[in-house]
Image (cartoon, rainbow, N blue to C red):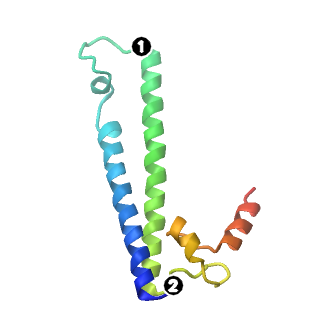
Amino acid sequence: MEKRKLNHFKKLLLNKRSELNTQLGIIRENSFQETMKNSSGDNSSYSFHMADQGTDSQEREKAFLFASREGRLIYHIDQALERIEEGTYSICQECGNPITEERLEVVPHARLCIECKSHEEKQNE
């Protein structure tokens, strides 16, 4: 792949990683920094209702899942950036054929061509 196109995809990946890091910061700030008492807005010393505690726990778990998903995506973006530096970006890691630019525009961190990705997904069903 020519250098101009590689720079385009590198910029896409860096922008996406920056967005994800911002989102992770927001998730951490809003969900993981507050105690149960602070998040409820209740400053009394009475115990919390079980339903409120369940809802708070569910919201924290959901935030954890979102953060985990975002973290995995950042990992894949970092791997793609490494492939750019190594000169193996846009080459399918399974079959060695080129990954189409159309696919990379949609999924710039793709490591497999569309045929190999389809085959992988069919095996995982």
Distance CA(mark 1)–CA(mark 2):
55 Å
**86 lies above or below 102:** below
Task: Identify the residue at image location x=76%, y=61%.
Answer: 122
Q: Secondary structure at mark 1?
A: loop
Please name the amino acid that badge 1 sits on.
His
Q: Secondary structure at mark 2?
A: loop
Specify whether 119 is left or right of 37.
right
Image coordinates of residue 59 in percent, x first then y, are 44, 32
Residue named by callout 1:
49
Q: Nearer the viewer, mark 1 or mark 2?
A: 2
- In this view of the protein, can residue 107 be seen by the observer? no
Q: Nearer the viewer, residue 1 or 88?
A: 1
Q: Nearer the viewer, residue 121 or 107?
A: 107
**97 lies above or below 118:** below
The dot on residue 81 is none
Task: Identify the residue at image location x=36%, y=43%.
Answer: 27
